Image: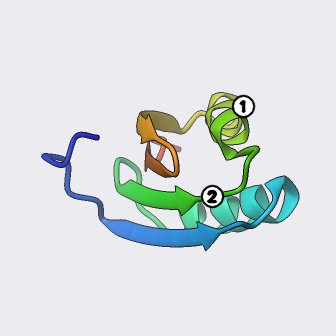
Amino acid sequence: MSYALEPDAEWNAGDLGCGDLVLELMTRMKTMTPGQLLKLVASDPGAPADIPAWCRMTGHTLVDQEPPVYLIRRKEN
């Protein structure tokens, strides 16, 4: 994990499953400004597949991942 990148926000999603996780993640990303970085901690067993897929589908950038920690950069709009 690249700790040189300082996240603008952090969220520990615990073991939230895919549906609840991505809905809450979408809500949290909308509150951030483009280019900001979110540090997400997600321990759900599906998260290593779900988080990268969600980023690809929504256009946000998965900067780094070392499950259960993910760094996601908010897209430019």
Question: Quick check: 14 above or below 71?
Answer: below
Question: Which residue corresponds to mark 2?
Answer: 43
Q: Disc number at residue 57?
A: 1
Q: Residue at x 35, y 55 (%)?
A: 36
Q: Quadrant of the N terminus?
A: top left
| Residue closer to the observer: 27 or 19 | 19
Residue depicted at 41% across the width and 51% down the height: 34
Looking at the rendered structure, the kind of residue marked 2 is Ser
SS at mark 1 in the image: helix
Q: Residue at x 51, y 61 (%)?
A: 41
**Residue 39 as seen in the image, left or right of residue 24:** left
In percent of width and height, residue 72 lies at 45, 46
Figure check: 19 above or below 2: below
Q: Residue 30 at x, y = what percent?
A: 58, 63
Q: Foreground mark, 2 or 1? A: 2
Looking at the image, the residue that sits furthest to the left is 4
Residue 17 appears in which quarter of the rendering?
bottom right
